[in-house]
Image: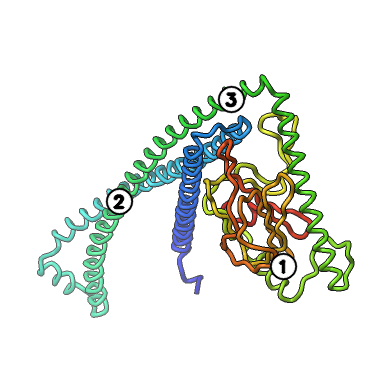
Amino acid sequence: MLNKIPSYKILFFLTLLLCSSFAFSQNNKQKELETRRQELRREIQKINELRAENKSKEKSQISLIQDFNYKISVLSNLIKVTNQQANLLTRKINSNQKKITELRSELEELKEAYAAMIVKSYKSKNKQSRIMFLLSSNDFKQAYKRLQYIKQYSDHQKQQGETIKSKTFELQDINKDLQNQKEDKKRLIADNKKIQKSLESERKQHEVLMKSIKRNLSLYASQIRQKQREANRIDREIDRIIKAAIAKSNKKAGKTASSKTFALTAEEKVLASNFIANKGKLPWPVERGVIRLGYGTQRHPIDKSLTIKSNGVRIATQKGAKVRAVFDGEVSEILKMKNVNPIVMIRHGGYLTIYKNLSSVNVKKGDKVSTKQVIGEVFTNPSNGETILSFTLSKGMNTENPASWIYKM
């Protein structure tokens, strides 16, 4: 069947298919970039709101540097995404301008051909010439063919007129799209100029603050080490509790106590499976917040010779923020240590989520909790007004990056 279709038609349809696919891909990419841009703008809004809430409080310089670093990072990403959108629009504008040039050329040719056809038709449109054309046929077969030709010529003339009309509308639509794209690009460029100004302002303030800090770097380095020691002490106690819970579950199941993962019952296996199925879709442990510190070992923003080991993420939120369970589970421990705010540990089959720095706790050990259930409130430091939740996620003894599990973290 394919052999009967002329090769130029096959080529035409393939080209059309590729162009449609490319346009669809570009539109999808533009939507993705716009979604990401709006997410980053909301993130900046959250940062500004949290800053405004704590404006009256005297923050530590370490906290201020972390704030600046995070906002600079978000602003830089916003500029990058906006530039990608502008570049994509430039390509679409160039493509449309090329289409317009080609369509105009095609329309000129069509109109010229149509005009010639009208002239020819006018010269031979009287009935007598048509009848003579038919009567001069050698036989009936030729007369029939000539009659068909007259009909086809008339149909072709109508078709040419419709094609010109269709191409004219297409040209108008592309011109309209082109104007909208140019306006969109103009807005993106103007928006990016504002973001650039904001970024420059943040960087200048960051530089001024860093100069002030560097005068007393040894003092800050000492504070940083002290905070890291305190974090390590808490993490060791959490590890001890998890290790004991794993050993207990394995002993109950008649397995080796040295395992780093929980021995699961049939019910716990289902829960763990559901937890895994929701990877990347789990809700945030607070309704509003921004990441102050990410997961993993990283250089300290003030003293690059020091490293921070973070087993989870630290989320800055507003005063009075409620802490929510990120998934169904059971409260496995309420940890209270000397000079440390309460910590809640929730088990989801073979996984654990840990919520640190709470001011109050609404649940007790052994309670069954559901997704988004309030389990407590985040502690607000009275001296600097900071409300920071530390959130950790682990599979048995091994911590994992919460950003891989929490929706758009």
Residue sticking out furthest to the front: 338
For discs 1 and 2, the disc positioned in front in the rendered view: 1
Q: How is the image coloured?
A: rainbow
Check residue 389 in the rendering and tell me which mark sits there, or answer none: none
* Residue 76 rendering spot, x and y as whole percentages: 54, 36
Task: Check disc 3 and give the amino acid type.
Answer: Leu
Q: Say which residue label 1 marks.
A: 349
- The span from disc 2 to disc 3 (Cα, nearest Å) is 57 Å
| Along the line of sight, the residue nearer the viewer: 365 or 125 | 365
Task: Check disc 1 and give the amino acid type.
Answer: Gly
Q: Say which residue label 2 marks.
A: 171
121 in relation to 30, above or below? below
Q: Residues within 10 Å of mark 1 (few under 14, many from 20)?
A: many
Dot 3: what SS? Answer: helix
Residue depicted at x 50% and y 75%: 1
Residue depicted at x 54% and y 48%: 289
Residue sticking out furthest to the bottom: 140
Q: Count the marks: how many? A: 3
Quadrant in the picture for residue 275: bottom right
Dot 1: what SS? Answer: loop
Mark with earlier residue (2, 3): 2
